Amino acid sequence: MARVKINVDGVDYSDDVEPRTLLVHYLREQVGKTGTVVGCDTSNCGACTVHLDGRSVKSCTVLAVQADGHEVTTIEGLAEGGALHPMQQAFHECHALQCGFCTPGMIMQSIDLLNENPSPTEAEVREGLEGNLCRCTGYQNIVKAVLSVAEVAPAAGATQGGSA
């Protein structure tokens, strides 16, 4: 067993983990952050995307021991004081989901996309989300949601639960 200390959504956790435990499983099973979903365990779908020190990572490709001493933000850590993060709100308003399985990862990747490029074109949004798969929506409303956040307040997409 290995001891890890990870700040998840602003709360410090200290746990014993098997060295081979994936971050996605640690978040779900030991921390209880079930909004981070297990999609494929092969990094193909992006459903498990979280922020590690402010940058998006597919948590099925990161070991929990690699996150030791770092800060992780999950979809549950975005809302503040009961108010949705601007990207969460945009996904809701633009109907950017159907089944919702990919939504947490899409939102986390979209925030990172706007951190890197606050005013992307439609093509840049599509390219920035290419590692996150959605089997329901056809992506049009997802792209619309991301662009709506970029248009309203480019800096709004760059904030994540007060920790970016």
Image: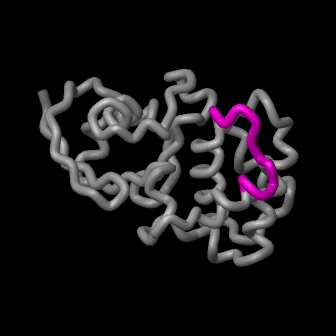
Classify 52 as above or below 59: below
Q: Position of residue 113 (x, y in %)?
A: 65, 58
Quarter of the image containing the N terminus?
top left
Q: Is residue 112 magenta?
A: no
Classify 114 as above or below 91: below
Residue nearest the viewer, comparing 84 with 1: 84
Q: Is residue 96 magenta?
A: yes
Residue nearest the viewer, comparing 25 with 131: 25
Q: Quadrant of residue 100?
A: top right
Classify 47 as above or below 120: above
Name the residue rendered at 50%, 59% in the picture: 78
Number of numbered discs on residues: 0
Name the residue rendered at 46%, 51% in the picture: 76
Residue that lies at the very extreme toward the front in this rendered image: 82
Q: Position of residue 162 (x, y in %)?
A: 44, 71
Name the residue rendered at 38%, 52% in the picture: 72
Left or right of 131? Residue 33 is left
Classify 122 as above or below 30: below
Secondary structure mostly seen in the magenta stretch: loop
Left or right of 75? Residue 6 is left
The boundaries of the magenta stretch are 91-101
Left or right of 58? Residue 118 is right
